[in-house]
């Protein structure tokens, strides 16, 4: 077996493996990591968290004084609108002004009417027992710091008559930042120790139930919610590994703490940062699925250690906004944010593939093109053309090899006619012919293999690039490049497809088949390769059709444009080089025939 044949087999094997594992590569389920010193509780366990609201906190303490006004109120800055709720001193709504859903500012908090608001405090580590009394509040504008401060306060009394006060103080920047700070201050009136001590835990601060925007169901491919955490001493971000259960991290060695926990969606992320790490006893995250209400809820919690002090003041920072590197990076530099935060490494909360560096380069290029032509669909096509031009030196040999194989079709057909029932002889004769003509039959596969990293990086970029969210390409058809386009909806469901008919996957599939037919040149395949080539030409496009049927429009625009450019390039090369190769082959045959004639004469 010669070297070219071995190489052909290896390349075919790689392509087949890629086609059968593409689902796992592109559309893997939620990433997971081995979690050390942690506990994962199954969803059938009796300890699963179900929130319930009440004004009674066991027999330990109760709210005292007149009942304050429970009406909600709104505080705005340049990018967000916060609705504060005096019940529990929480936030019931956050609207992102610069990111829209159906023409309106996107709701960052996705919750059902029965769900507890974010930033609720709980008794000890009992996450079923929220401190949901109605708090008094006072709003103060700190113009010197460019901050609006909302101070909630309520006094409580224990069963033995001991009084203490809980203050929850929110600081909202008045500029374009998505970070807010929450100070939890608890103190006693007589200077005695704070009476919140439940087996070593004082209180728990929660965030949930879900990051928006609204969804009906989750898909690991195109929409998801994931809990991540950062342990600086372990080198980087980890993903919480659970499914429909509770994750708890509470077994700390000396100086080992989580820097932050995050709830990451496709476009938005909530990151909770305890600014004083050694006060936290336990980090908890939940993942619950339901048949009604919010179909998937994800909370994360910080449980504070109990103390013998008479006053505690704990500071928490929360980033509540888009997955944007420029927004997240500003909290690595104290001079770039009003709170003076630094070195928090929030960028690591973003969802990124192992080709994040290539995604960053492609995103920069896409943004530069968009500045000149403010249409992301056009920008994707232009960037596709640029990539094709850059890869042309690598793909040139493959396209010319395909054209030369096409020129050899008469000779290849002659070999098949000479050995109609002998595949081994066919393969040997074709291999000899390819070697004589200097052709590698599988060289046309090289451009496809070289483009795989770019395809994967483009998938990562176009599938979750927040700039494409709501970006229109063609009015009336492709109105949002971040979701599938729909030309009409059926009154019934089709297996594997659903009831929405998308045109782009159909166009993409036909373009892929046409491109494969030209580049693979199946008519010139050896007998042992004919089945393989047929699978490559028809099987892979059909597989990709179902895999990509619900893909974002931007991704299909890129892949369809790639196929069309490949088709145009190959047709041009076939037309220009094919004639040249035919003449060269004809001349070589004439010279060989003349040499044989002279030899016979001698």
Image (spheres, rainbow, N blue to C red):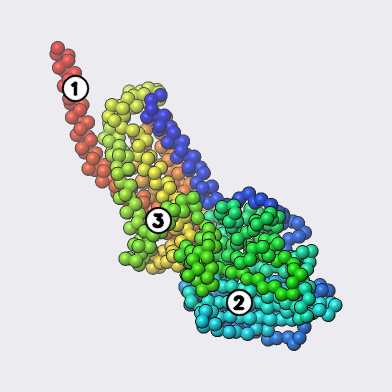
Count residues near mark 3 (Cα–Cα under 10 Å), then give few for <14, some for 14-19, many for 20+: few
Count residues near mark 1 (Cα–Cα under 10 Å), then give few for <14, some for 14-19, many for 20+: few
Spatial CA span between label 3 and label 1: 56 Å
> Of label 2 and label 1, which has the lower sequence position?
2
User: Residue at label 2?
Assistant: 170
Count residues near mark 2 (Cα–Cα under 10 Å), then give few for <14, some for 14-19, many for 20+: many
> Of label 3 and label 2, which has the lower sequence position?
2
Whole-percent x and y of residue 76? 53, 80
Say which quarter of the image contains residue 58: bottom right
Q: Residue at x 20, y 30 (%)?
A: 586
Task: Kindly identify which numbered label has been placed on residue 361.
Answer: 3
Say which quarter of the image contains residue 193: bottom right
Point out the frontmost of discs 3 and 2. 2
Task: Evaluate whether residue 505 shows in this view.
Answer: no
Q: Residue furthest top?
A: 602
Task: Evaluate whether residue 98 shows in this view.
Answer: yes
Screen quadrant of the N terminus:
top left
Point out the frontmost of discs 2 and 1. 2
**Which of these two is toward me, 476 or 405?**
405
Task: Kindly identify which numbered label has been placed on residue 455.
Answer: none
User: Residue at label 1?
Assistant: 593
Q: Residue at x 45, y 44 (%)?
A: 540
**Which of these two is toward me, 454 or 442?**
454
Label 3–label 1 contact, CB within 8 A: no
Whole-percent x and y of residue 360? 43, 57
Q: Residue at x 59, y 73 (%)?
A: 181
Whole-percent x and y of residue 459? 45, 54
Q: Residue furthest right?
A: 160
Kind of element beneath mark 3 = helix
Kind of element beneath mark 1 = helix
Spatial CA span between label 2 and label 1: 92 Å
């Amino acid at each position: 077996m010669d070297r070219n044949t071995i190489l052909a087999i290896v390349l075919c094997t790689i392509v087949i493996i890629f086609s059968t594992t593409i689902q796992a590569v592109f559309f893997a389920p939620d990433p997971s990591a081995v979690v050390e010193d942690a506990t994962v509780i199954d969803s059938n366990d009796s300890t699963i968290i179900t929130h319930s609201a009440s004004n009674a906190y066991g027999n330990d303490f109760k709210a005292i004084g007149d009942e304050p006004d429970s009406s909600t109120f709104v505080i705005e800055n340049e990018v967000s609108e916060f609705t504060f709720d005096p019940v529990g001193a929480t936030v019931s709504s956050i609207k992102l002004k610069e990111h829209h859903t159906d023409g309106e500012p996107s709701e960052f908090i996705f919750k059902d009417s029965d769900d507890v608001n974010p930033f609720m405090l709980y008794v000890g580590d009992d996450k079923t027992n929220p401190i949901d009394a109605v708090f008094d509040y006072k709003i103060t504008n700190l113009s010197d710091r460019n901050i609006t401060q909302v101070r909630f306060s309520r006094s409580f009394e224990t069963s033995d008559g001991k009084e203490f006060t809980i203050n929850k103080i929110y600081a909202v920047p008045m500029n374009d930042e998505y970070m807010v700070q929450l100070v939890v201050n608890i103190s006693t009136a007589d200077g005695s120790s704070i009476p919140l001590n439940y087996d070593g835990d004082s209180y728990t601060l929660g965030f949930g139930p879900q990051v928006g925007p609204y969804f009906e169901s989750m898909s690991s491919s195109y929409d998801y919610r994931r809990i991540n955490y950062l342990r600086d001493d372990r080198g980087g971000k980890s993903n919480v590994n659970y499914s429909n259960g509770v994750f708890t991290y509470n077994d700390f060695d000396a100086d080992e703490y989580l820097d932050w926990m995050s709830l990451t969606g496709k476009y938005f992320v909530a990151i909770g940062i305890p600014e004083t790490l050694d006060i936290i006893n336990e980090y908890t995250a939940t993942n619950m699925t339901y048949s009604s209400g919010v179909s998937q809820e994800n909370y994360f919690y910080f449980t504070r250690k109990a103390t013998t002090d008479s006053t505690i003041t704990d500071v928490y920072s929360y980033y509540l906004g888009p997955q944007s590197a420029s927004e997240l990076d500003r909290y690595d530099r104290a001079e770039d944010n009003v709170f003076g935060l630094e070195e928090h490494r929030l960028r690591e909360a973003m969802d990124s593939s192992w080709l994040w560096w290539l995604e960053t380069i492609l995103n920069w290029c896409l943004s530069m093109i968009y500045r000149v032509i403010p249409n992301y669909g056009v920008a994707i096509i232009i960037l596709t053309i640029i990539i094709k031009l850059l890869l042309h030196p690598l793909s040139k040999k493959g396209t010319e090899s395909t054209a030369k194989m096409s020129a050899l079709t008469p000779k290849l057909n002659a070999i098949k006619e000479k050995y109609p029932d002998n595949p081994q002889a066919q393969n040997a004769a074709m291999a000899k012919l390819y070697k004589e003509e200097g052709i590698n039959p599988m060289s046309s596969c090289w451009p496809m293999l070289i483009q795989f990293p770019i395809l994967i990086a483009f998938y990562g970029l176009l599938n979750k690039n927040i700039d494409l969210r709501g970006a229109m390409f063609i009015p009336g058809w492709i109105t949002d490049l971040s979701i599938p386009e729909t030309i009409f909806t059926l009154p019934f469901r089709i297996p594997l497809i659903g009831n929405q008919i998308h045109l782009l996957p159909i166009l993409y599939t036909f373009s892929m088949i046409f491109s494969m037919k030209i580049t693979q040149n199946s008519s010139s395949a050896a007998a042992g390769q004919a089945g393989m080539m047929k699978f490559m030409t028809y099987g892979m496009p059909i597989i990709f059709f179902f895999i990509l049927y619900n893909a974002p429009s931007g991704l299909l625009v890129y892949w369809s444009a790639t196929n069309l450019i490949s088709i145009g390039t190959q047709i041009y090369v076939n037309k220009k080089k094919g004639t040249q190769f035919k003449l060269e082959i004809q001349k070589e045959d004439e010279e060989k025939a003349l040499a044989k004639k002279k030899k016979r004469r001698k």
